[in-house]
Image (spheres, grey):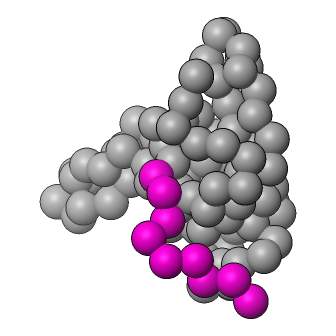
Amino acid sequence: MGDFEIGDTVKVEMPKGFNKRGVHGVNVMYQTWIESRFEGATGTVVDVNPTGTHGIPLFLVDFRQFDNSRIGIPQQSYWFRENWLEKAKTPLAR
């Protein structure tokens, strides 16, 4: 099903690209998506929906245990696709 299980610490990594000015960041196709506002945030997987929407597995990530204040995330938890997540290298729990 996926590389992540409940309790795993993950970091949100959206696809990267260059904008018209040549600045490297979130790909322009995804810049208006709500998921792009979580770029770089660290959280914990708390639930898995194996069928998700359109048959794509979704992972509910909870950001409450980590200090993401510099990122300014819009919500405390959100559903993400597996390809937008990567395992966090070091847990930064409060």
Query: Percent position (x, y) of residue 94?
Result: 74, 89
Instruction: Count how many numbered circles sit on residues in the image.
Output: 0
- The secondary structure that dominates the magenta segment is loop
Instruction: Out of 45 and 67, give the one closest to the viewer.
Output: 45
Judge from the rendering whether residue 32 lies leftward or rightward of residue 57; answer left or right. left
Q: Residue at x 30, y 50 (%)?
A: 16
Query: Percent position (x, y) of residue 63?
Result: 75, 66
Instruction: Out of 9 and 39, give the one closest to the viewer.
Output: 9
Q: Which residues are magenta?
A: 86-94
Query: Percent position (x, y) of residue 85?
Result: 51, 48
Q: Residue at x 67, y 64 (%)?
A: 43
Instruction: Out of 69 and 7, give the one closest to the viewer.
Output: 7
Judge from the rendering whether residue 14 lies leftward or rightward of residue 36; answer left or right. left
Is residue 79 in sight in this rendering? no
Quadrant of the image containing the N terminus:
top right
- 64 lies above or below 6: below
Can you tell which quarter of the image residue 13 is in? bottom left
Judge from the rendering whether residue 7 lies leftward or rightward of residue 39; answer left or right. right
Most extreme residue toward the bottom is: 94
Q: Residue at x 51, y 38 (%)?
A: 3
Most extreme residue toward the left is: 22
Residue 38 among magenta residues: no
Query: Percent position (x, y) of residue 65?
Result: 78, 76
Is residue 89 in sight in this rendering? yes
Q: Residue at x 58, y 42 (%)?
A: 4
Residue 87 among magenta residues: yes
- 91 lies above or below 27: below
